[in-house]
Amino acid sequence: MKPTIYDVAREAGVSIATVSKVINNTGRISEKTRKLVLSVMKEMNYQPSVVASALTGKSTYTIGLMIPDLANPFFSGIARSIEDRGHALGYNIVICSTDYDPEKEAKYISLLLQKSVDGIILASGFENVETVRELIKQKVPLAIIAREIPSLEVDTVAVDDFLGGYQAASHLISLGHRRIAIIARDLWSNRERMRGYRHALDEAGIDYGRDVEYVMESNVESGKALAEKLLRSADPPTAIFACNDLLAMGAIHAARRLGMSIPRDLSVVGFDNTAWASVTDPPLTTVAQPIRDMGTHVMNLLIQEINGEKKHKQRIVLLPELVVRESTAKYVRDM
Amino acid sequence: MKPTIYDVAREAGVSIATVSKVINNTGRISEKTRKLVLSVMKEMNYQPSVVASALTGKSTYTIGLMIPDLANPFFSGIARSIEDRGHALGYNIVICSTDYDPEKEAKYISLLLQKSVDGIILASGFENVETVRELIKQKVPLAIIAREIPSLEVDTVAVDDFLGGYQAASHLISLGHRRIAIIARDLWSNRERMRGYRHALDEAGIDYGRDVEYVMESNVESGKALAEKLLRSADPPTAIFACNDLLAMGAIHAARRLGMSIPRDLSVVGFDNTAWASVTDPPLTTVAQPIRDMGTHVMNLLIQEINGEKKHKQRIVLLPELVVRESTAKYVRDM
DNA sequence: ATGAAAGCGCTAACAC
DNA sequence: GTGTTAGCGCTTTCAT
């Protein structure tokens, strides 16, 4: 059996209270006994039980991360940065991939709560705001990343999606494109990006693609299917703004399948600037989110919240940045 | 405050023992009181505390996953599949990215143990076998994925790395290449792949690249640097076998940088068949690991281990499969 | 069929 | 400085 505080106390000839005090550096204990206890602990290879200490009201040093899909490079990047910051602060992360499924979201939340996590980070998803509202009511320390919920008072870290969409569309417009389509999913962030895109189009007096069809999943396949449909339509686009790098890749595949060459026949810009963007064929022009910074920031906010070191909630908005690579080019009028 | 079992008991007019019994479906309770208690629980929105129940010796329903790097597409794929299987079985996963750093490995292990996880999955890494041996001695339920430790009695799921390396090299040889270099990291799995590669070369009577230089990290940059060095050497390869898709991408970048075209001037084969392989430029010929299956299998093994449903440890070896895409081509003699 | 009570490993008053 | 003790929320005999 693993040694308990009692074993250590007995072995050291002191009381469990004393041992507890040296573990937590509380109360007063003579340097002599402290050394003694410490050495006994080491000798017995004693590890205090977080479970037991949590039961007395202390932290579990575990936080939950609700994320749409770990296998999506944007989210795995986010997860990694959150994990790193958490590790530095002494916290472990339990990962919950929700696939944007409200049922999974609810189930995972319930599990996390039963396990008394110290806090929860919501990474996107949660179209069902009620779940979040409930969490707030229960005073669960919370922080949101990559998603703004304007109506809620929560610590948030996000990129300015509207601006990102605007940047993407403006870039395309400046290259001479006018028939610019968008591929998006029906999610808050994507809708914001679309607002930005539309704003740029309006500014330029372009009226194209008023009725968008959403893609059902954020993956290459879905992007490909929708892009193919767009490209085969009566008034095909000369440029496509995809709301994330995976969808952008799908668009590129679709174009290629139709015998088009990128960027000669079609310009494509993505979003996120995941690790993918620089390795794809061709390298992807995309709107970069500062993934590492975002992760570090949410984790910081959450921990401050947990420690009650903050009287006011914060909303940190980082700015996206267009990274021009080789998937976009000047529009050349068809012969 | 969250309601406790006492609150429920009081509200239902029964003892906490009774409530406990209906929660766990143990002992005998009349259908009448069961219904009553159940309804009170629902009404109060009662959620039993896993922490408290864990303290009495029950499971925490949490397992630790030690992984080199979440941001690496191979490992995020592994993590996702493990999480899915875990979720189906009622377990949460806490992720620990170690970067192959023995110190981080040790620290994370210690944290997981303090938190009384029910078991641990080791995904690769652990060149320091002592840590693993220690875990076994402490009887911590354990399972290993993507790494074989022949000398240890542990449940393991792995792909036949030797065969994979052999397949990769054989493919290149069959295309007429003779100057076939390898890019690998000094890790167990990579060394196995190299053994397979070497075996294929020996079989074909090829003597090339006897002294390999290892790359220090598994990422595009390192692959690029080493590949560039190889390509600039006195006797440059016409084909490169990279021990994972990231390194392969690096090799492609290096070649391009030197003005070479893939696969015309250089053939490249990767390993893993991550989501990357099909989106890169050009699509990557690579040795596929059945990622989802592997994740499902380890999780199954670990749970069986935890539940003591298995008298003997198992070693499941899955077979890799060469996926030919467009980064490899017939060797054409230089003019 | 139900309940009283001991105990899981630890923390935090409160005594001494 | 150090020890005693009462919980924390739950499980599990063992009575009744």
Image: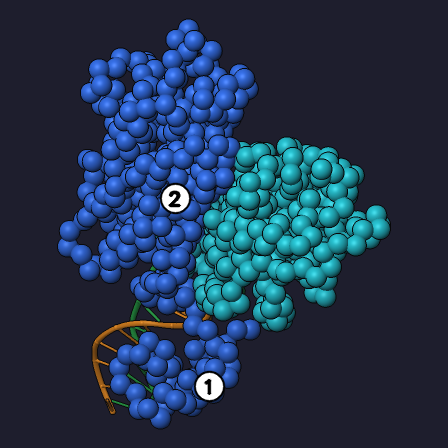
Chain colours: A blue, B cyan, C orange, D green
What secondary structure is found at the residue carrying circle 2? Answer: strand
- Three-letter code for the amino acid on which mark 1 is drawn: Val
Where the N terminus of chain A falls, by quadrant? bottom right
Q: Which residue is drawn at 31% across and 16% down?
A: A178
Q: Residue B169 placed where, x, y %? A: 74, 46
Choose top left, top right, bottom left or bottom right for residue B35: top left
Q: Which residue is drawn at 23% across and 43% down?
A: A317
Q: Residue furthest left?
A: A311
- Mark 2 nearby-residue class (10 Å; few <14, some 14–19, many ≥20): many
Where the C terminus of chain A falls, by quadrant? top left
- Three-letter code for the amino acid on which mark 2 is drawn: Met
Q: Distance between the residues labelled 1 and 2?
A: 41 Å
Choose top left, top right, bottom left or bottom right for residue A134: top left
Relative to residue A66, is residue B256 drawn left or right? right
Q: Badge 1 is on which residue? A: A40
Query: Circle 1 marks a residue in which chain?
Result: A
Q: Residue B144 placed where, x, y %? A: 63, 56
Q: Which residue is drawn at 39% across and 47% down?
A: A78
- Mark 1 nearby-residue class (10 Å; few <14, some 14–19, many ≥20): some
Q: Is residue A280 above or below residue B222?
A: above
Mark 1 or 2, nearer chain start: 1
Relative to residue A278, is residue B321 drawn left or right? right
Q: Residue B86 placed where, x, y %? A: 53, 46
What secondary structure is found at the residue carrying circle 1? Answer: helix
Relative to residue A174, is residue B62 drawn left or right? right
- Front residue of A226/B133: it is A226
Q: Badge 2 is on which residue? A: A66
Q: Is residue A290 above or below residue B217?
A: above
Query: Circle 2 marks a residue in which chain?
Result: A
